[in-house]
Amino acid sequence: MATIYLIRHGESAANAGLKTFGTATIPLTPLGQSQAQEVPEHLPNHLEYIIHSTYLRTKETAKPTINAYPTATVEEWPEVREFTYLDPVKCMGSTMAERKPMVEKFWETLNPDLQMHPTVESFGQFIKRVKAAHLLLNERFGGSHKNVAVFTHALFMKAFFQVAEKPDASAKQLMSEFFDCPVIYNCDFFTYEL
């Protein structure tokens, strides 16, 4: 049985309340870099694979683990990137506090088909991607007895476990229950067996 270690990135500039200029390029803060240094201490003695999303903050979080496991295969998977749903034009140069009204408005709609901008996902599209990530992990590692670290994001992790627990639930149901999931803090990690 393979063990997947899903790891949220360290504290990012956005998490710290700083202005950001594009979700894919948000870097870690010094605290986030320190948190990332501690991740390898919590992982098994051997990792076969290290996977990170396409976003800078997961790449930076994965770096100390990549250095600690030089024989591990490193891969970048767009499937495990964060759920980006706000209009990027309206968010350019904004802080988390400034985005909060837009975030609340999006989630209050409970509309899994709502797409705020052509370059971002609807919740329904996001759930399809999370299901695709489940399938890909199963195809690559299911029953393989490998240890795999996946550096990803909080919303992705919440949806990943929702889909694992309720694979047949509609996107609308998952959206309505999304914030019933526990808070996932920076560099929290959870295991999932295949």
Image: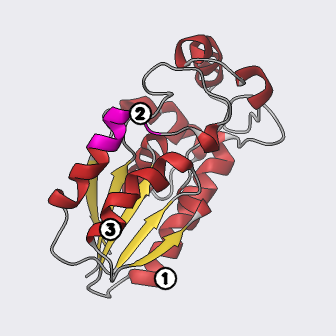
Can you see residue 91?
yes
23 or 165, which is in the foreground? 23
Task: Look at the image and say whether residue 181 sits in the magenta stretch.
Answer: no
Residue 32: x and y, percent?
35, 38
Callouts 1 and 2 close, C-beta under 8 Å? no
Asked if 17 appears above or below 10 in the picture, the reply is above
Total of numbered circles in the picture?
3
> Is residue 187 among the parts visible in the rendering?
no
Between 37 and 90, the one nearer to me in the picture? 37
Disc 1 marks which residue? 139
Helix, strand or loop at label 3? It is helix
* Residue that label 3 marks: 67
Identify residue type, mark 3: Asn
- The span shown in magenta is 28-34
Please tell me which of labels 3 and 2 falls first in the chain: 2
The residue at the far right in this view is 118
As measured in the structure, the alpha-carbon distance from the residue carrying label 3 to the one carrying label 1 is: 27 Å
**Residue 107 location in percent, x, y?**
59, 24
Give the Cα separation between the discs numbered 1 and 2.
35 Å
Q: Residue at x 36, y 41 (%)?
A: 10
Amino acid, disc 1: Glu
Residue 173, disc: none
**Please, what secondary structure does the residue beneath circle 2 have?**
loop
Residue 29 tag number: 2
- Measured from the top left, where is residue 67 in percent x and y? 32, 68
Q: Of tags 3 and 1, which is closer to the observer?
A: 3
Judge depth for marks 1 and 2 and give the one in front: 2
- In the rendered image, the vertical position of residue 165 relative to residue 12, given as above or below: below
Pointer 3 or 1: first along the chain: 3
* Quadrant housing the C terminus: bottom left
Q: Position of residue 66 (x, y in %)?
A: 36, 68
